[in-house]
Image (cartoon, grey):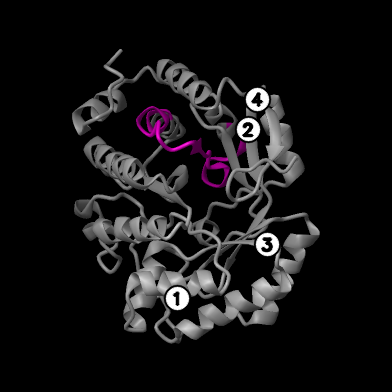
Amino acid sequence: MPSLKTNNASQIISLLENNDIAELGVLADEKRREIHNQSDIVTFVIDRNVNYTNICTCKCSFCAFHRHKNHKDAYVLGYETIKSKINELVSANGTQLLLQGGLNPDLPLEYYTGLLGKIRHDFPELTIHGFSPPEIIFLARNNELGTEEVLRELVKNGLSSIPGGGAEILSDEIRKKLSPGKISSEKWLYVMQTAHKLGIKTTATMVFGFGEKYGHIAEHLLKIKRLQDETGGFTAFIPWTAVPGYATAYDYLKVLAVSRLVLDNVPNLQVSWVTQGLSIAQVGLHFGANDFGGTMLEENVVSSAGCTNRASAKKIVEHIEKAGFRAARRDTFYNIIR
């Protein structure tokens, strides 16, 4: 077994090169129990992902969701449409609204602040987990504002926390090939650093399976680890596989386990049943993960690429319990509701 030290890329690469994933799973499970005081609780959240627009100028090579503004399927959602979606979420006892969209140059900052204000007014108890770093940087550029100023405006109007979307692999060698129009890894990290400085909690993600090397995954994990050491602002890490992509379930479980071993300073590790399916997600609970993610009453980006896994809260609870754990519903900040 390779060394469990994870302070540099070579040590992480050594872990990723270990083909005994059962052993990695045991080690990751031990780390999970250490971090969570031997708890057998696995959490989940009832949420909905609302994509307010699919118009996007970024045009990432792997994205099947984006549309040009003149495309027949292009859209920008008005508030009444969004409100009806939120009503369905609230009716299902949902507590978290995930709000993300394309980089649409025709939407001014007022669209975002107005939308947040209306949601906060009509649904004061709802957590708005919205706008990934590429959206934040785009808003700043499009409105000739600073990143911190944009973040302050969004929070003032109702934003609760920020998702970790748009990270893909935080290696510019890979990013230039996949999404040359998207922000650099440095800017992604800068948004998160700035948000944490302002007291805004965020999640972090990684999408792999693009044909990257272990060194690129190690680079990504180390960047998250170092920023977390500095700010402590990441509540969770969520790795998932590109759809379509080159990663298998074997690859997924290996990366999930190594993520838990490396990111011992990020409290929560989430499985990705949306891309892996419920059965592999169950197995992931024995590979270091302690969270099953959200019910995702609506999801459009991954499903646009052909991945259409679905799960109700009841189904999630069943899978958690069948995996040998106790299910608990949580809020966005990982406080257990019941």
According to the image, label 1 marks what residue? 67
According to the image, label 2 marks what residue? 42
Which dot, 1 or 4, sits closer to the camera? 4
According to the image, label 3 marks what residue? 126
- Which dot marks residue 246? none
Local crowd size for mark 2, using a 10 Å CA cut-off: few (<14), some (14–19), many (≥20): many
Cβ–Cβ under 8 Å for marks 1 and 3: no
Q: Specify the quadrant that holds the C terminus.
A: top right
Q: Earlier in the sequence, mark 2 or mark 3?
A: 2
Cβ–Cβ under 8 Å for marks 4 and 2: yes
Q: Which residues are magenta?
A: 257-279
Residue 211 figure quarter: top left
Q: CA distance from mark 2 to mark 1?
A: 37 Å
Q: Earlier in the sequence, mark 3 or mark 4?
A: 3
Is residue 256 at all visible to an observer of this figure? Answer: yes
According to the image, label 4 marks what residue? 323
Q: Is residue 295 magenta?
A: no
Q: In the image, is 23 to the left or to the right of 285?
A: left
Q: CA distance from mark 3 to mark 4?
A: 30 Å
**Residue shown at 28% from the left, 22% from the top:** 5
Local crowd size for mark 3, using a 10 Å CA cut-off: few (<14), some (14–19), many (≥20): many
Q: Earlier in the sequence, mark 4 or mark 2?
A: 2
In the image, 232 versus 207, the foreground residue is 232
- Amino acid carrying label 2: it is Val
Cβ–Cβ under 8 Å for marks 1 and 4: no
- Amino acid carrying label 3: it is Leu
Q: Earlier in the sequence, mark 1 or mark 4?
A: 1
Label 2: element kind: strand
- Please provide percent x and percent y for residue 66: 44, 71
Residue that sits furthest to the top in the current view? 1
